[in-house]
């Protein structure tokens, strides 16, 4: 107001006003750049994270295999009177057969030490593997010579995949010069290949990194998540309905509300402690079991679901409740027929995000003992299991170099499941909303 | 039709009668000892300036004040001789018998069919799908909406225009075959043309139902109401034939309101 252009009599033609406008424009563009660079930073961080994990993990989906030229037509494996093929395989000395096959390719080892070095080229599971494959294709018995592909030893795999350095002094590597020469020999004979690592998806935890798999971990995670689902959703939605639709607005309810919000922020490891006290000490449920894990995660997810469901229920317009009441609907009918159907997309989205969070949780599971080496795929809720995040944690602490790529590969699988769950949340929300 | 149901045993000629009703919101008294009678097959308008308690009084007639926190209603409201505020009365039943249409159209985000069928469904008023379809058709016919929507009964009720939505809400209310229909400024959210359609509809519906309509619009009251009640500061100042209220108001306040001295 202080300055008026004397010639035009207007506030808007003064130099002072133009300067002000220019300053405003500069500030605006500065804000735009700052906020934009925030996005760029976040996306870059995400890409770097994904990129580095993918770079570390891609070779985990590959398995280096050695081809063994074998002949099963010899005596002990041929069909015998009163002996099933399975029993014959059971009794056969595959270790010797494998050893013979390797000798056929690489020549006779001169001494005990050389033999041990040669055995290390193959996975220690090689003999068992040959038996398993023979049972799967019994026609090998009458075929004469067949090449059976078995996993290579973990360090051989690392060398072939280029994960372990070759061109360093012998003292700095795990394989000797002689072993490296054998690898070259196998490669030259076409008896070394890199194949897709089906074992990673069909097998379970093992001490040998070349044949570990995530099957037990994934099954354990899924069963645990289903338990969480079954417990947390009905309880959470019911609590949200009560708090939004029925609860009187009293001091006590404000306290309950405050506590639920606080619970959602409680560190998950504390929830694990609660699970330990409640489910294992007090209820005496089996330690390390899927049931206890699922219940503990349900404890953790419950406040998240309650908060999301409450927000969704509160977002249902009151005019719809009024409309239903005006038509003579009871409170129950208003809730079941009007409020819940309209709140469903929001409830589902919040719920699935809560579950995705539960899926990636490790700390509370450590507290309830779900951190053991468990090579068996769980079959029921009372079976012990090491869910995927725990499996990742366990592998990340293993000393063998080959476990590093397995860790990263398992993280990729976990991320893929998360992305699928979030996509499902988006899909369900859009589908339910689009109906009208 | 429900409008023709006979009067209750007590011999009252009124569909509904309000006796000494007070409404409080916490300490504030919104309605002060109101007395009112609603005759069968008439349109009664509740008219008055904003904040005079006309909508609150209307909500007493189907107990829609109950869900409002801090609301307290005393006095008697008799529906065909029975007090709807008596201790054992279920408000849900009262609301089924006394339909209501809100100020702004509030169709459910469901199909047109499901909107109309909502009442019959929750009360179990039909035997089979065919009968439900018949109720839906009749209710839509009644408001003249049938011809406009008969080919799109599966479309969302919310996809209709504002005026159509309000007629949908009226259809939805009469699908319950109520004894009375309450309307709370049903045209205030609509354009003049749609308002005129609703006003015509109110006149037509009065052949079968009795209707209590709240309005702050004097012309509307003159056009649709058989009788008009004038409310001011929570009190029923004057009730009478609409023509008498407008041409020969008895009370000073009514004269001032009609003369445009306040609104």
Image (cartoon, rainbow, N blue to C red):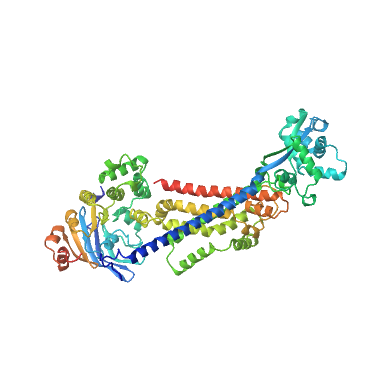
Coordinates of residue A95 in the picture (x, y in percent):
81, 40
| A137 vs B122, nearest the viewer | A137
Residue displayed at 67% across by 48% down: A406
Is residue B239 depicted above or below A148 in this figure?
Answer: below
Coordinates of residue A25 in the picture (x, y in percent):
39, 60
Q: Using residue B75 as the reference point, say whether residue A120 is left or right of it.
A: right
- Can residue B258 be seen here? The reply is yes
| B210 vs A396, nearest the viewer | A396
Residue found farthest to the front: A7
| A331 vs A96, nearest the viewer | A96
Which quadrant holds the N terminus of chain A? bottom left
Q: Quadrant of residue A105?
A: top right
| A187 vs B119, nearest the viewer | A187
Q: Using residue B103 as the reference point, say whether residue A433 is left or right of it.
A: right
Residue found farthest to the left: B248
The total of numbered circles placed on residues is 0
Q: Using residue B161 as the reference point, say whether residue B252 is left or right of it.
A: left
Coordinates of residue A11 in the picture (x, y in percent):
29, 66
- Can residue A284 be seen here? The reply is no
Is residue A105 depicted above or below B145 in this figure?
Answer: above
Coordinates of residue A213 in the picture (x, y in percent):
67, 46
């Amino acid at each position: 107001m202080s300055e008026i252009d004397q010639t035009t009599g207007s506030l808007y033609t003064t130099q002072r006003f133009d300067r002000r406008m220019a300053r405003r424009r500069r500030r605006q563009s500065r804000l735009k750049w700052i906020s934009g660079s925030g996005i760029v930073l976040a996306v870059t961080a995400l890409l770097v994270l994904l990129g580095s994990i993918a770079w570390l993990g891609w070779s985990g989906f590959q398995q280096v295999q050695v081809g063994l030229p074998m002949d099963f037509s010899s005596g002990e494996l041929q069909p015998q009177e009163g002996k099933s093929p399975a029993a014959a395989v059971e009794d056969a000395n595959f270790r010797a057969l494998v050893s013979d096959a390797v000798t056929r390719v690489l020549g006779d080892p001169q001494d005990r030490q050389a033999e041990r070095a040669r055995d290390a080229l193959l996975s220690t599971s090689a003999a068992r593997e040959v038996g398993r494959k023979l049972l799967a294709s019994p026609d090998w018995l009458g075929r004469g010579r067949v090449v059976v592909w078995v996993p290579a030893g973990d360090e051989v795999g690392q060398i072939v995949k280029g994960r372990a350095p070759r061109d360093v002094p012998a003292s700095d590597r795990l394989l000797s010069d002689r072993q490296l020469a054998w690898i070259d020999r196998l490669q030259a004979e076409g008896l070394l290949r890199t194949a897709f690592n089906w074992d990673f998806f069909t097998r379970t935890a093992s001490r040998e990194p070349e044949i570990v798999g995530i099957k037990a971990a994934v099954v354990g995670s899924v069963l645990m998540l289903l338990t969480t689902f079954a417990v947390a959703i009905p309880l959470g939605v019911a609590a949200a309905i009560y708090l939004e639709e029925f609860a009187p607005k009293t001091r006590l309810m404000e306290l309950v509300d405050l506590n639920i919000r606080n619970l959602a922020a409680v560190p998950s490891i504390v929830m694990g402690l609660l699970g330990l006290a409640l489910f294992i000490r007090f209820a005496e449920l089996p330690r390390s079991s899927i049931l206890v894990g699922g219940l503990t995660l349900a404890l953790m997810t419950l406040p998240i679901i309650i908060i999301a469901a409450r927000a969704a229920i509160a977002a249902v317009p009151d005019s719809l409740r009024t409309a239903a009441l005006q038509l003579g609907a009871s409170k129950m009918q208003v809730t079941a027929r009007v409020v819940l159907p309209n709140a469903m997309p929001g409830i589902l989205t919040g719920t699935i995000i809560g579950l995705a969070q539960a899926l990636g949780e490790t700390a509370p599971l450590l507290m309830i003992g779900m951190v053991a080496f468990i090579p068996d795929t769980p079959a029921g809720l009372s079976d012990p299991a090491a869910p995927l995040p725990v499996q990742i944690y366990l592998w990340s602490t293993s000393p063998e170099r080959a476990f590093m790529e397995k860790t990263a590969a398992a993280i990729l699988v976990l991320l893929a499941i998360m992305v699928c769950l979030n996509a499902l949340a988006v899909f369900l929300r859009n589908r339910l909303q689009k109906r009208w | 039709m429900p409008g023709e149901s006979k009067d209750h045993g007590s011999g009252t000629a009124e569909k509904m009668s309000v006796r000494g009703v007070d409404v409080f919101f916490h300490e504030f008294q919104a309605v002060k000892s109101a007395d009112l009678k609603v005759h069968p097959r008439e349109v009664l308008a509740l008219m008055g300036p904003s904040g005079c308690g006309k909508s609150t009084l209307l909500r007493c007639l189907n107990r829609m004040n109950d869900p409002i926190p801090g609301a307290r209603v005393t006095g008697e409201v008799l529906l065909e001789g029975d007090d709807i505020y008596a201790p054992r009365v279920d408000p849900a039943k009262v609301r089924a018998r006394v339909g209501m249409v809100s100020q702004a159209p509030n169709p459910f985000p469901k199909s047109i069919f499901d909107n109309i069928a909502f009442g019959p469904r929750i009360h179990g008023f039909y035997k089979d799908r065919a009968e439900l379809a018949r109720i839906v058709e009749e209710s839509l016919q009644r408001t003249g909406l049938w011809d406009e929507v008969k080919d799109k009964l599966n479309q969302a009720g919310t996809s209709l225009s504002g005026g159509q939505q309000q007629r949908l809400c009226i259809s939805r209310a009469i699908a319950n075959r109520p004894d009375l229909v309450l309307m709370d400024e049903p045209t205030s959210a609509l354009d003049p043309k749609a308002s005129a359609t609703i006003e015509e509809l109110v006149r037509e519906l009065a052949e079968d139902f009795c209707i209590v309509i709240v309005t702050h619009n004097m012309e509307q009251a003159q056009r649709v109401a058989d009788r008009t009640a004038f409310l001011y500061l929570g009190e029923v100042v004057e009730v009478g034939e609409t023509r008498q209220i407008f041409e020969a108001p008895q009370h000073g306040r009514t004269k001032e309101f009609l003369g445009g001295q306040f609104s």
